[in-house]
Image: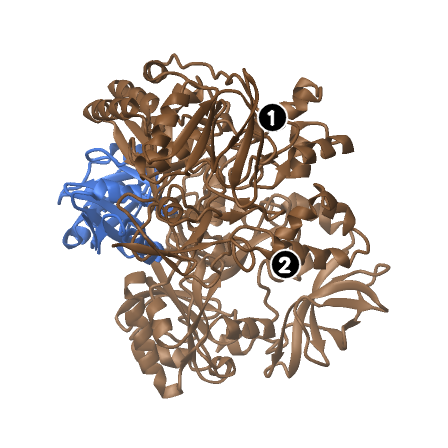
Amino acid sequence: MANVQDRAVGLIECAASPKALDRLIAPGHGARMLRVAPDEAIAVVAPAFTADVRRELNDRITALDEDALVLDVSDGWTGLALIGADADRALSYLSALDPPDGDAFIQGDVARVAAKILREPDGFLLLVPAYWGEHVRTRAVEDAGAQTVRS
Amino acid sequence: MPSLRLDGRRLEVSDGDTIAAAAFRAGVRTFTRSLKAHRRRGLYCGTGDCANCLVTVDGLPGERACVTPATDGMRVERETGWPSADRDALAINDRLHRFMPVGFYYKVFARPRWLWPIAERVIRRATGTGTLPVNAPARRTPTRFVRVRTLVIGGGVAGLAAAATASTDGSVLVADEAALGARTTDAAAREAITRLGAEARAAGADILAGHAAIGVYEGPSAALVGPDELVEVEAERVIVATGSLEAHGVFPGNDLPGVWLGRGAARMAAIHGVPIGKHAVVVANTDEGAQLADAVRTAGTDVTLVAGRVLEARGGHQVTSVTVLTPEGRRAFACDALVLSLGWAPRDTLLRMTVEPEVVGAGDVVRPGCTLDEAESSGRAAARGNADEPREADPWPITEHDGYVCVCEDVSMHDLEHAWDEGWTSSEILKRYTTATMGPCQGALCSRHLAEHARAKGAAPAARGRTTARPPVRGPRLGDLTGGVHEQAERRTALHDRHVSAGARMDHSGVWLRPGTYGDVADEIRAVRERVSVMDVSTLAKFLLAGRDAQTLLDRVFPLDVGAIAPGRARYLLALDEAGYVMDDGLLAALHSSYFLTSTSGGADRMEAWLRNWIDRLDLHVHLVNQTSQLGAINVAGPHARDLLATLSVDDLSRDALPYPGYAEITVAGVPCRAIAVGFVGELSFELHHPRGRSVELWDALLNAGSTWDIRPHGLDALDVLRLEKGHVYLAQDTMPDDHPAKLGLGWAVATHKAEFVGKRALERMDALPLERRLVGLRFDGPPQRGHPLAVDGAIVGRITSCAVSVAAGGPVGLGWLRAVDGEFPNVLRAGDVTATVSATPFYDPEGVRLRG
């Protein structure tokens, strides 16, 4: 079986020059840095550390690019955890993308909308724009649900 | 004893029965009536390849009785025949067949023209297979995506051998429409399937039983339909090992119930234990003749085995005799079953759907009639990259002077001859004219006959090929075809549940789901004009732009004078493309070290791509963040809007601190907001852009505090009237793709003095030309209709794009397009029975006093 659960996550967006992002040292607090574009990176962090990571990122990136934008964009995303023994199979009902390996992430269509997929120890973390959160949640339960998923 | 009901009659079901087996055991011989002539049709292929046994199962039409397992309580209905399949009044058509040659309805009902709609209705009622359950709840099949190195279609000997070998070279998926080996009566084949299945599994192959491939596409990729899912497979290569079936013999009486293809008859007898008759004649020209005869005998049928050409089968309700031209001469046999094994017809439709070299065949499908050993070696060779080239069966095809070529569509040899004589002289146009190969079996039985007919008639090589193979090979359900593709992924704001619980009618507005109205549009309008109201405008596209070149970017791409916007102020913004046409509009607010841009709800993705493109093209140092999903937005509008905010904020909200059009960072009910003083509805209004996660909190606080002024939320219906009263346009509704600002009366939004902006040169050229069309305000003397043409002296010169009956504007008003007539724009027009008079806009508060509050 697989479970789909809402997962609160902190997300800090860094918009800066590619050179600055290339040189950026990742923050602590267990943050995972996703380089989603040459001039854009997103830190994924436990909600409790969002403010700390934002501050840390802001200090580091503005030293490299004074115009850089560092924003807490947690509100703009819905985090859904797809976890359990059948998580891979459940994901295959939502996306044609190959699951990411290790610390890698992928971005593309999940349930026909733009999303990011991160590998978790027990499955996947799906990050989707908040306005599509309900859509992906429903698809996860209804499509994959008939096969594998509990909500 | 488990049972099913066939047309209301209870039939016992034995373990392992298909619907066809249970029905045949109970004496059912006529399963369907043919499409046009309403001839009796019985079980024929027994392998799911033909359409003779399509039935409705538990309300779902088009199920193949010969391969659908029978279950207890199942409700089965035969789909054709009136009043029943056994006694069909429309069987009279068979006697009238000669008066209804192929294509007759194209000609007979062509004149007078009114006749065809009636004839079409009658013909449709009299033909067809099954009835769609229109009142059944929509069913949506989940789609699963799989990527593998090798996809093997077919779990027979060749397919499993291919899978076992290919598994040493990456992932393998085997798809078979049944359980492995379930449909073979040959013990040696079953043993080989068991052995190879184990070998394939041990090698790591994934075997997907009960999944029929319905199409192979470029890529290559394939679609598999299972009982509860659609599987989209992307593979590096596809090995088609779908085997072959016995050739369809064409001779007089070939469609009578009791005429069987060999393997189907063998299955009925050997697997289900149901005798196919008392005395069967097996006509076999293949190596399987003796084996088939033995299989048929297992259920107690007396069998005569002969080789030769079938000249004719006779019978009424079912076959009663057959005449065969044997090596010893012409012989007639009395029988109640005729079993044919005349040759092989490779199931090669999937193989012919693509010309990609990564799609190859193995086994019977490319070497029809091959032995088990040959099938296994063919499969292994295909897996190693040495696939056999397709080979046609020999002898093929089997045709006499008459008989049904296409049993799905009731097309006979006589029909083909007739069509040929009319000038339809190639296999492709014969198909289109006669509809042969276009029935549910998709030419599985007859496509070779069509090509052979063209060849025998002397058609040129290009005109005698087999007709194009297209998906689906097997008839999918409609839910399978939707398969997750055709759905609207609606966007919801954070306030969605609040709107629903407030009784809002939720409308699709582009990609968003938004409140149309909360029930009383007039009161929603009054709340905005007289009191205070809120609207969820979280759908607006929102962007933050920063960086040392941010102003340069905005100045270069937008036609407004960005440098003139002081921090804390906002301006209306038009986005033009290189041709000077309006592609979007919005607001630009100058923050202290960055800019905040909002544009129309549906255009966020396009605007972001457009801005990023210009950043790259101009090589500018600008950072852009799309905040559309991150920020919610609520518009607080009405004469008491400032009063309401003052009750929830300690910030300075005076006219000096937050003028129109102005911008300020404020806190409302504890929620940090970017407040922009706007004027779309023509009243004092503030858009509060805030973190989406706090939308509900802010909305509730505004509604609670607003009760002092009898606050109401308003929806899209009210907004449509409010903005129209101000003469504001809805892009796309009031505009056309080639509108430049002057046509829309928005020339004031273009800073023509600027040296450069996107679309400037095009605008300069267009400004030198006379305006041939423009959007105008209209007042009506009666209720107008949106989209209604506007006419002068009977000549249409425009149309109404928006209209409403407005209390504030003192009557019906609208916007509409007008074309110049002899260089002049008319002022008085007719819109049906209504007179329209061109009027200046805004209709309401033309001086803009109210929105400055």
Q: Is residue B518 left or right of residue B248?
A: left
Q: Looking at the image, which residue is at 29% across and 41% down? A: A92
Q: Looking at the image, which residue is at 76% across and 49% down? A: B768
Question: Is residue B362 among the parts visible in the rendering?
Answer: no
Residue type at the position of mark 1: Thr
Q: Secondary structure at mark 2?
A: loop
Q: Is residue A79 left or right of residue B569?
A: left
Point out residue B676 in the picture as x, y percentages from the top left corner: 42, 66
Q: Above or below — where is B838 with respect to B195? A: below
Circle 1 Cα neighbour tier, 10 Å, few/some/many (<14 / 14–19 / ≥20): many
Chain B, chosen colour in render:
brown
Residue depth check, mark 1 versus mark 2: number of the one nearer the observer: 1
Q: Secondary structure at mark 1?
A: loop
Quadrant in which the N terminus of chain B appears = bottom left
Residue type at the position of mark 2: Thr
Chain A, chosen colour in render:
blue
Point out residue B175 in the picture as x, y percentages from the top left corner: 33, 32
| Label at residue B735 | 2
Q: To which chain does the residue with label 2 belong?
A: B
Point out residue B791 in the picture as x, y percentages from the top left corner: 79, 67
Of B162 and B49, nearer the camera is B49
| Residue underneath mark 1 | B399
Which comes sooner in the sequence, label 1 or label 2?
1
Of B528 and B420, nearer the camera is B420
Of B304 and B477, nearer the camera is B304
